[in-house]
Image (cartoon, rainbow, N blue to C red):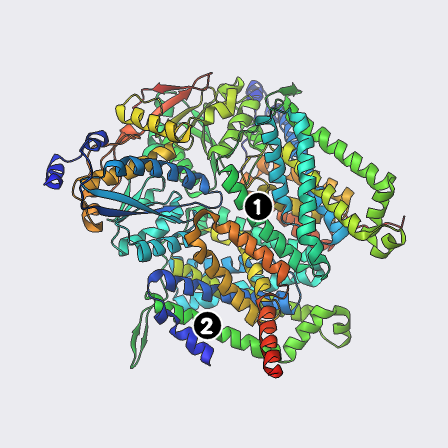
Amino acid sequence: MVTILLIAVLPLLFQGTYARSILVVCAINVLIAIGLDIVIGYAGQLNLGQSAFFAIGAYVSTLLVTLAGVDFWIAFLAGTIGAALAGAGLALFAVRLRGHYLAIASMGFAIIVYQILMNWISLTQGPLGIYGIPPPPAWRVPSIGRIDFSDIRNFFWLVAAVAIAAYLLLRNLLRSPVGEALIALREDEVSAASLGIDGARWKIFAFAVAAALAGMAGCFYASFVGTLVPDAFFITESFTVLAMVIVGGAGTLLGPAAGAVLLTVLPELLRGIGDARLVIYGLALTLVVLFMPGGMAQAARLITERAQHRQRRR
Amino acid sequence: MAPSVPSPLVGEGQSEGVSARRASSVLSFLPVLLQQSINGVVLGSLYVLVALGLTLIYGVLLQINFAHADIVTLGAFAAYFFIHSLGGGYLSSIAVAFLVGGALGWLLNAAIFAPLRERGDELRPLIATIGVSVLIENLALAWFGPVPYAFDSPYSGQVIRFAGAFITIQSLLVVVVASATIAALYLFMHATYVGKALRAVAQDRETAGLMGIDPNRLIMLTFVIASALAGMGGAMLGPILVLTPFAGASVIVKAFAIVIIGGFGNMEGTIIAGLFVGLIESFTTQFLDPGLIDIVVFGLLLATLAIRPTGLIAERREENV
Amino acid sequence: MARTIAAALGAAAASAWLAAGPAEAAEKIIKVGALLPLSGPGAYFGAQDKQGIELALERINATGINGTKLEVQYEDSACQPLPATQAAKRLIDEAKPDIIIGEECSDATLAVMPLVAQAHVPLLNAGSSSIKVTDPGNPWTFRIMPNEVMQGEDLAKNAANELHAKTAVVLHENTNAGIGNADIFEKIFTKLGGKVLANIGFGRDVNDFTAIATRVAGLGAVDVVPTYTLEGQGLKITQALAQAGITKGGGGKAIQIATIWLPQSFDPKAGKAAEGYIRIVQFDPNDQRPVVRDFVKAFEAKYREQPTHLNAHAWDQIFLIADVVKRGGHDAQSIRDALAATKGFEGVTGTVTFDEHNQNISMDTVHYVETQPDASWKVLKWN
């Protein structure tokens, strides 16, 4: 509750469009990262296709809004469902493939989606790009008045609310038998099957949920940036999200959310350094993986344990 | 975009009957088919040089190495500077790139893979190599700058023409070096004790222990060989691809596809798949559109995996040595 | 005082006001934000832009402009919409620039345009070719380079009229600029009675162009091959077309033509294959106009290499800003207004005169050159 309140006042603490934009991008990336955590951290499936679901959400919703004049929220729903269906489709491969085969297959899937966006110019505009994508239409709330999403604070609250809702929903879901089934699947598929867990069905479920969240993020991304080109969804985007999950700590949900925030804010903070920015980013990523294998989640646990230990000694 | 029916030669047959015209157009089309086959084999040989290292590492460590691409890039730059700053010859620059690649492989294993291997996790080394890749790319950008280098080997300008087709000596050299490398690697793996041990580790770690060879040393050796091949691939690719700090990245994605289609860890499979992908590329360019190459290659990859989950040529579990 | 005189005089040649005398004591700073791709493959543009900017700053700030100096704040916009909008927001929030220059890539420029307009800061663009930047454009965005339509129409007309070309095969990278340029050439060339045998696009990750050259060779006799790529792929295409015996450089009949993507250092790198290549260049380092000689001399002294069109564009952007400041621009609004009134500003890439869409309409920025056997340029008087 305190955390939610803290997140809610963030855009008031940070003045200026730039700082608030970083907050919005953080919220968008949190959505994608916690989604991917379900697949990687819980179901134990190495999925490099997250950039494709992000793209599908962005393009489906944007094309519905700009070409068909559909209401943003209906387009949002369509983008989310579209991404989820694509996720379920990719999961059919996951059911058959293991480990690194799945990693490359999902990477191949992401590359195909990217290339389709590049080449189907009559529909997607390809590299020519789509411009002037509007923000979600304003809400009229009785007694509060008009909530205009071209105001970046309102946009942040909207995305943050969706991200928090998704987080809480996933957390409760993963504490239920669903989470146990997924973890059992990750640890040992054969014994999971002997416990009566239908591996295929749960994999499809995990992929679809992850893809749906990425799709939602894509809808927000397009209406936030206002410009859509396929290059935003190149395969490297999948690597970035994967890095968020690992740096945060896979399989902890809160970790990847924190990882998303860190890896969004870090390159922006490093802007002051100038040309050495990405060198330091690469170095930091490598060092974290080397010396903090459990990611930020593990580091946090260690720190609290030590603090408790010290208290006990007193 | 459908290719229109080709060739300056067709013109002569135009006054004759339709069937004759068709026959002559098919005939005149043969050089194009021959040429595209040559192009495909040359490109495929380059891919094989890069993909072999990936498949070696996977076979022994079950690890994916994204930094492999950057070793290709650095190998190309090593060869370039050996020629342009130290006045070396092109052929000896290939050897230099081989050594530089090997040294980088040693470093990469000592710094990243060896420490992470203890923890037995397949994800983290992969992320670490992504981090290393970002690091190397941007260091290279700072050092070498973003303007493409003109890496001309003395052989790129020399063209052999035959039967209506052509090949540059450089391209021929690529095919020759790739074939020689494959032969040497095959000999090493099958005729030397260490090579046999490597294959044994790829199948079963404990067997290697029984053979009395320290698996850590074998892993180090694998890394050095794989990376030396990548560095050498860089020197071979240098005169053919666009030499920038991002050069290797443009090849690596296809190399992954090749490794999978060939069956991870399977050398013969990788070679066949590499040539196959090279041919697909040149024929996609001829009959469809070069923009569709990735869709065709990865579409085939997914189709392959849908039918055979372990690749076109299955991951091979050889009998113990 | 000096400001009103300058405004009355209108555009002054860059060299003229440099001699205007030492800086006055009370120093005013005009802040220039530079949105440049400084990381990733787009750094090809950003690094060269930065060289031109730094050199121009040294020159201008040595004396100041009637007591005003220019200060540049760089921001990495990475050639992509999201990083570009983030970089623009940071610039606007923190540096509070009076004017912004950049981006190079059309999609990044188009993405930041609404933001910059909303903040009421003028955006001075040089390198984005998409027609949308200035058509419809917005009152705050200016472009000193001829857009894709101006260049493409001119090239197609000259191919048909000067080279008497009947057939063409268009090769282009699959980017905003590549597709835009290729499509305009095809449209105009076809209208003039020419025939485009194929319009072939390829990704920026394609390395080997032998397969594409083979396909072109199979299409039959072709008169011109317009190619739209950057230096790296351009090198490989030119060599592959020559090896396949299609273009003049390889003993064929076809003439490779193009618009402004390649510097003069390209031709020696491509070697014999580039012989007979005809293209539009924005900047000719051999141009004998005094402003160009001055720039080339200064550039070669500082960087020990020949300046490219990207270096030259950046130099012109900074000198145009200095000119505007001299004409009375002192904040974002007055700089915008003075920019819009620019007529006949003499830069190293040509003159600048903006139309009502803030597009430079001077066609003297379009120079045609033909590559000679010794890799030098012969200037063609087509304009």
Relative to the observer, which residue lies in front, C78 or B294? C78
Relative to the observer, which residue lies in front, A303 or C184? A303
Q: Amino acid at mark 1?
A: Ile
Residue C123: x and y in percent read 29, 47
Marks 1/2: CA distance? 37 Å
Q: Is residue B314 left or right of residue C253?
A: right
Against C312, residue A276 (above or below) is below
Q: How many marks?
A: 2
Tell which subunit mark 1 falls on: B
Q: Quadrant of residue B122?
A: bottom right
Which residue is at 81% across, 50% downward?
B316
Relative to the observer, which residue lies in front, A180 or B112? B112
* Secondary element at tag 1: helix
Relative to the observer, which residue lies in front, B262 or B23? B262
- Which residue is label 2 attached to? A162
Q: Residue B240, can we see it?
A: yes
Against A140, residue C246 (above or below) is above
Q: Residues within 10 Å of mark 2 (few under 14, many from 20)?
A: some
Residue B17: x and y in percent read 59, 23
Residue B43: x and y in percent read 65, 35
The C terminus of chain C lies in quadrant: top left
Q: Residue B44, can we see it?
A: no
Q: Is residue B100 left or right of residue B147?
A: right
Residue A196: x and y in percent read 74, 76
| Most distant residue in the front direction | A314
* Secondary element at tag 2: helix
- Which residue is label 1 attached to? B136
